[in-house]
Amino acid sequence: MAKTDPFDIHADDYDRWFYEHPLIYAAELKAVDALLPPSREQGLEVGVGSGKFASRLGVPIGVEPATAMAERAARLGIDVYPGVAEALPFSAGRFRYVLMVATICFVDDPLKAFEEAFRVIRPGGCIVVGFIDRESEIGREYESRKETSVFYRDARFHTAGEILDFLVRAGFQQPVFKQTLIPGEREDVVWEGYGTGSFVVVRAERSGA
């Protein structure tokens, strides 16, 4: 069952975070942008939320189960469909790429979500996933206080290794990682790989076969 209540009830608080943390937001956008395809047409963001990433990155279509968030994304020009990551309302091979940012920690079945992404991505396309690494500095902080968080109370944070395992089991190949929010570095620094930064992005390919 989609965990939508906090996002419907506290949509204003969710959006306020982006205005109160502009440097972190910019760093996350930069890391995601580095791994998205150059052409943003024929793309989908799963868990588009209020559209803060899709609208800035040129992703035209979104799926969002929380009504209040979907309405905000639509006002930013995103074509939003109701639905959840494990049952996408699209035909096979519809998209050139699928983006998920801060979504996978909220889905009930991460493997099924990635399998659905694989299904709707055409051969030769890719998935791009941005997430907070549970083993990182921010990940440990979020994990330690999630019981008191409106948004993260029901979240299940994952390690980079776990995300990679889900992607491979779903059929994706050739993963490439970027990381940002690195302790001791400026917020806008993006490194290759994972293991140091708190926000990690991985791109993996759907075989052309």
Image (cartoon, rainbow, N blue to C red):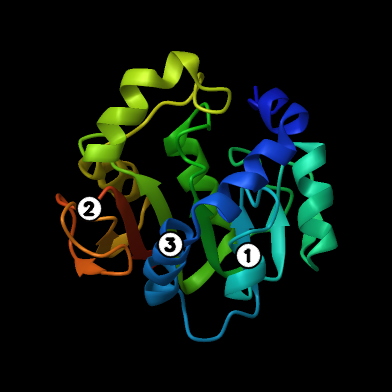
**Which residue carries the number 3 mark?**
23
Numbered circles on residues, count: 3
Q: Residues within 10 Å of mark 3 (few under 14, many from 20)?
A: some
Whether label 2 touches label 3, CB < 8 Å:
no
Judged left or right of residue 43, residue 97 is: left
Tell which tag, 1 or 2, sits nearer the viewer: 2
Q: Amino acid at mark 1?
A: Ala
**Which residue carries the number 1 mark?**
54
Q: CA distance from mark 3 to mark 1?
A: 18 Å
Whether label 1 touches label 2, CB < 8 Å:
no
**Which residue carries the number 2 mark?**
197
Q: Residues within 10 Å of mark 1 (few under 14, many from 20)?
A: many
Looking at the picture, how far across and down is residue 172, in whole percent?
35, 58
Q: Amino acid at mark 3?
A: Leu
Q: CA distance from mark 1 to mark 2?
A: 22 Å
Q: Amino acid at mark 2?
A: Gly
